[in-house]
């Protein structure tokens, strides 16, 4: 047995035992700042070195499994991937990643033809083996270079390899992956001046947007956007999520506690709701294509019993990849019913159509302009979504006799419109002017408050 490897295995066993002891004892909970930072720096050094060993070790096992030695078969495994799974406990996808990175940093080798193939990224391989970078750093540095390697001179690529590797050893601290990725991308772009057209053509071939099949009340979305489409969407999402760069607005009672009225949604949830806002506004745009001579219309279908009970299920045709009717809670149907691109279809048990919404349900452009001048933005205090992104909400529901009139319509953003019932906010019209009543945890007095510009004089919590 190799003495060096035996000694290293014993050292690793001691290191594992020490780390396990620290975690079990709860020492991290009481460690001071300097001890904690020093400990994590040491763990980071160990982590990168372990990753380097796993990447290079994966390459070695794959190479030996492809020869007459058949390392995998002699280890009672079907493949090199299974060997790594059983010895490390890693997932198959993780082992595949190690394999991909191992192929990137293969050392110089002689092919069966006698041709000597140089190492692709020798400097970055050295940075990996010495623990200057780990698997994440290697991938961040080499991905932009792999995309252009067939279009640029090998000597230029080798120079970038040296620059990136030198960057990882300039300071004692590890280089962040984002920093490596940004520098690699910038150098690759400068080097591959003529590759823009080829990349654009490849990108256009790969562009995609897919709707999956509804599960657990959600329809998954996947795909790849070309950068200009992604950029346009990002700008719109930012505009809606933070239209004025203002914090949450009106508060109704003083408190020394944390801001209870702050937006509790995650950024992913806020992006989802912002996309809903965009989709609600787009169909009414003047240049949108027509469908059957009119604006695109989403049809919500519910039975008489569901409409009468005010709860249960409605359906939206073609809302996922199956193209069939997708069930949605009736609350969702009530929400979208205020939008001018929606029609509600109600059927009897035998399938006979008993009700179809008509145009007078929807606020006209003139009515919307008037309501916009009055409300300016979403009427829920603290929400600054501007009028152009808001929907018009019937204060008294249209299904209950509420009129489609400026004295019964208010601006409200997609998020608050969709969940207003469960949030506990109430809205009423007082002499043609909207007022709101917050949930009792915001205002224990449950008093009605003016909205929009009329609320500017209200005190903020803690004032």
Image (tube, grey):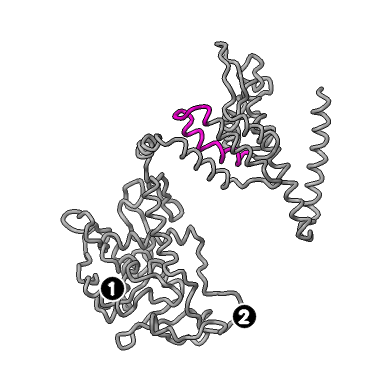
Q: Left or right of 451: which side holds 318?
A: left
Quadrant position of residue 4: top right
Prevailing secondary structure of the magenta residues: helix
* Residue 51 x %, y %: 67, 37
Q: Pointer 2: residues within 10 angstroms few (<14), some, or many (20+)?
A: few
Q: Read off the residue under disc 1.
A: 399
Is residue 346 shown to the viewer in this render?
A: no
Q: Residue at x 38, y 77 (%)?
A: 379
| Mark 2 → mark 1, Cα distance in angstroms | 43 Å
Q: Residue 413 is drawn in which quadrant?
A: bottom left
Residue 213: x, y in percent?
A: 40, 47
Query: At which x and y percent is residue 117?
Result: 57, 19
Q: Foreground residue, 278 or 123?
A: 123
Single out the mark in the foreground, 2 or 1: 2
Say the numbered circle drawn on residue 222: none
User: Residue 366's x, y, as percent?
Assistant: 21, 74
Label 1 SS:
helix
Q: Determine whether the residue tagged by mark 2 lies in a helix, strand or loop.
A: loop
Mark 2 lies on residue: 256
Q: Earlier in the sequence, mark 2 or mark 1?
A: 2
Q: From the viewer's perspective, is 380 left or right of 25?
A: left
Residue at 63 percent across and 46 percent down: it is 175
Please give the range of residues in magenta: 135-156
What residue is shown at x 52% (from left), y 74% (from top)? 261
């Amino acid at each position: 047995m190799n003495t060096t490897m035996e000694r290293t295995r014993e050292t690793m066993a001691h290191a594992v035992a020490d780390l396990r002891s620290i975690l079990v004892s709860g020492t991290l909970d009481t460690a001071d700042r300097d001890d904690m930072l020093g400990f994590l720096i040491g763990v980071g050094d160990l982590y990168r070195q372990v990753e380097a060993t796993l990447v290079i070790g994966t390459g070695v096992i794959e190479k030996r499994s492809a020869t007459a030695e058949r390392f995998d078969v002699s280890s009672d495994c079907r493949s090199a991937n299974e060997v790594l799974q059983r010895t490390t406990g890693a997932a198959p996808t993780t082992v595949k990643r190690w394999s991909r990175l191992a192929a990137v940093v293969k050392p110089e080798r002689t092919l069966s033809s006698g041709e000597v193939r140089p190492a692709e990224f020798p400097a970055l391989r050295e940075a990996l083996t010495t623990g200057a970078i780990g698997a994440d750093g290697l991938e961040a540095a080499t991905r932009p270079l792999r995309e252009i390697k067939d279009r640029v001179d090998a000597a230029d690529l080798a120079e970038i390899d040296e620059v990136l590797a030198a960057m990882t050893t300039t300071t004692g601290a590890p280089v962040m992956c984002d920093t490596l990725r940004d520098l690699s991308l910038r150098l690759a772009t400068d080097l591959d001046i003529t590759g823009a057209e080829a990349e654009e053509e490849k990108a256009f071939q790969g562009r995609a947007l897919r709707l999956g099949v509804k599960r657990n009340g959600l329809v998954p979305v996947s795909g790849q956007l070309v950068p200009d489409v992604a950029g346009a969407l990002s700008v719109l999402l930012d505009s809606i999520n933070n239209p004025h760069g203002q914090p949450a607005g009106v508060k109704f009672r003083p408190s020394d506690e944390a801001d209870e009225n702050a937006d509790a949604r995650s950024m992913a949830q806020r992006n989802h709701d912002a996309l809903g806002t965009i989709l609600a506004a787009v169909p009414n745009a003047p240049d949108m294509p027509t469908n059957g001579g009119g604006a695109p219309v989403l049809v919500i279908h519910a039975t008489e019993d569901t409409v009468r009970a005010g709860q249960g299920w409605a359906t939206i045709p073609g809302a996922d990849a199956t193209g069939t009717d997708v069930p949605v809670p009736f609350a969702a149907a009530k929400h979208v019913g205020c939008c001018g691109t929606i029609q509600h279809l109600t059927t009897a048990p035998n399938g006979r159509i008993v009700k179809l919404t008509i145009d007078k349900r929807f606020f006209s452009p003139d009515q919307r302009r008037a309501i916009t001048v009055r409300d300016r933005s979403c009427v829920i205090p603290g929400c600054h979504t501007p009028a152009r992104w808001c929907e018009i909400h019937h204060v008294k529901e249209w299904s209950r006799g509420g009129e489609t009139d400026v004295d019964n319509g208010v601006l409200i953003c997609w998020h608050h419109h969709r969940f207003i019932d469960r949030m506990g906010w109430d809205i009423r019209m007082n002499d043609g002017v909207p007022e709101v009543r917050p949930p009792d945890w915001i205002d224990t007095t449950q008093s009605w408050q003016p909205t929009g510009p009329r609320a500017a004089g209200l005190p903020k919590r803690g004032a």
